[in-house]
Image (cartoon, rainbow, N blue to C red):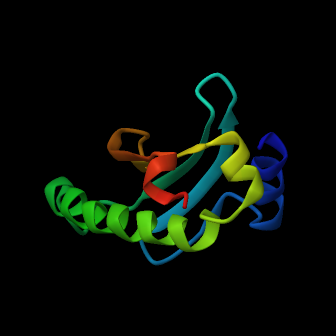
């Protein structure tokens, strides 16, 4: 999984602008917790933190569905039972929202 994180960083040329408000910073793998971690920064000035949190709750639901579609049959994810974590911070590095997708949520 460390290789997956490193390849994702290279192929996506991270950090990279994802959309008008979001920068994908990096992907890393934490072997101790068996978690692949996606880090993002958000330009929060146009919306309140509470608005961002509500929006990110919807993103979380979408990401669970995406994980099911992308990784439910992936032999590496199945063998390792990896947790997927997303962390969203403002441009100053203050955490706004985080969520984890456990293997039982996306594996068949």
Is residue 80 shown above or below 53? above
Give the x, y percent position of residue 73.
67, 65
Is residue 26 shown above or below 20? above
What residue is rendered at 66% in x and 58% in y?
A: 15
Residue 11 position by quadrant = bottom right
Can residue 85 be spotted in the picture? no
Give the x, y percent position of residue 74.
71, 62
Give the x, y percent position of residue 69.
56, 74
Give the x, y percent position of residue 58.
28, 68
In front here: 92 or 31? 31
- What is the residue that sits farthest to the bottom in this orientation? 20
Location of the C terminus (image quadrant):
bottom right
In front here: 20 or 74? 74
Location of the N terminus (image quadrant):
top right
- What is the residue that sits farthest to the front in this orientation? 108
Tell me if 25 is positioned left or right of 62 in this view. Answer: right
What residue is rendered at 39% in x and 71% in y?
A: 62
What residue is rendered at 44% in x and 65% in y?
A: 63
What residue is rendered at 65% in x and 50% in y?
A: 26
Residue 7 position by quadrant = bottom right
Residue 47 position by quadrant = bottom left
In front here: 35 or 24? 35
Can residue 82 be spotted in the picture? yes
Q: How many marks?
A: 0
Tell me if 46 is positioned left or right of 30 in this view. Answer: left
- What is the residue that sits farthest to the top in this orientation? 32
Is residue 96 shown above or below 62? above
């Amino acid at each position: 999984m460390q290789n997956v994180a490193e390849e994702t960083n290279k192929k996506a040329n991270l950090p990279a602008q994802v959309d008008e408000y979001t920068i994908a910073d990096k992907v890393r793998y934490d072997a101790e917790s068996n978690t692949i971690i996606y880090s993002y920064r958000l330009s929060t000035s146009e919306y309140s933190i509470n608005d961002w949190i509500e929006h990110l709750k919807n993103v979380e639901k979408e990401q669970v569905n995406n994980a099911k579609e992308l990784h439910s049959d992936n032999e590496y994810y199945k063998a390792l039972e990896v947790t997927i974590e997303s962390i969203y911070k403002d441009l100053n590095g203050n955490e706004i929202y985080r969520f984890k997708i456990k293997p039982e949520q996306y594996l068949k």
